[in-house]
Amino acid sequence: MSRLPTSGPSGDLFDAADALMADATPFTPSVILEVLQPPVTFHRVFVDITQSILAALMLSHAVMLSETQADANGWFRCSPDEWQADTGLNRFEQQTARRALTRLSLLAEATRGQPPVPIYRVDATRLWERIVAHTAQRGPRS
């Protein structure tokens, strides 16, 4: 099987799909996965804790950023454009998710610098308390 084009003459993904169809390439899951972007994943328990898939997705990404990009006090930067690029959440969905997470005291937000840049911190202690409470309420996994 030949290497899949990543874009057509105009650089457009749709041109790449047209080129694939013209080649009569069999569409298998592996062919489809070559064309797609990396998957966006989240921790399932966060849906139960936050009662929101949007908040669970944002929280999962925030936990990862806390581990990989946070300063000594746990704060990390992530612009609205970066949230959207990383999670697929648009600005309205980000706002909805942030509201839910701050209401639950799982995410703190502030601004730093000039011009102001949004920064965030996951309250890991509060998150752990909610995970433990959820696990105790749910009982052992079957």
Image (tube, grey):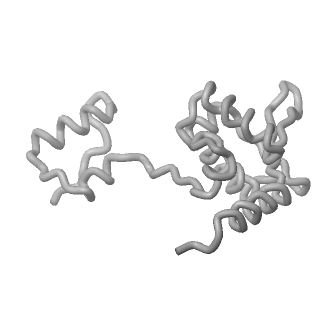
Residue that appears at 81% across and 61% down = 129
Query: 54 or 1, which is in the foreground?
Result: 54
- Is the residue 43 above or below the residue 114 in the image? below
Give the camera-side residue of 112 and 52.
52
Q: Name which residue lies at 71% across and 55% down.
A: 63
- Along the line of sight, which residue is nearer the eye, 30 or 135? 135
- Image position, residue 29 (x, y; %): 25, 56
Count of marks placed on residues: 0
When asked about the image quadrant of residue 21, the answer is top left
Q: In which quarter of the image is residue 17?
A: top left
- Position in image of residue 47 (x %, y %): 61, 50
Query: Vertical placement of 44 versus 54: above or below?
Result: below
Q: Residue at x 10, y 39 (%)?
A: 22
Image coordinates for residue 38, horizontal then vertical, percent: 45, 51
Q: Looking at the figure, which quarter contains the N terminus?
A: bottom left
Residue sitting at x 57%, y 57%: 44
Q: Is residue 111 left or right of residue 100?
A: right
The answer to which of 117 and 125 lies nearer the viewer is 125
> Residue 51 location, x and y as percent?
64, 44
On the image, which quarter does residue 64 sit in?
bottom right
Using residue 16 as the reference point, say whether residue 130 is left or right of it.
right
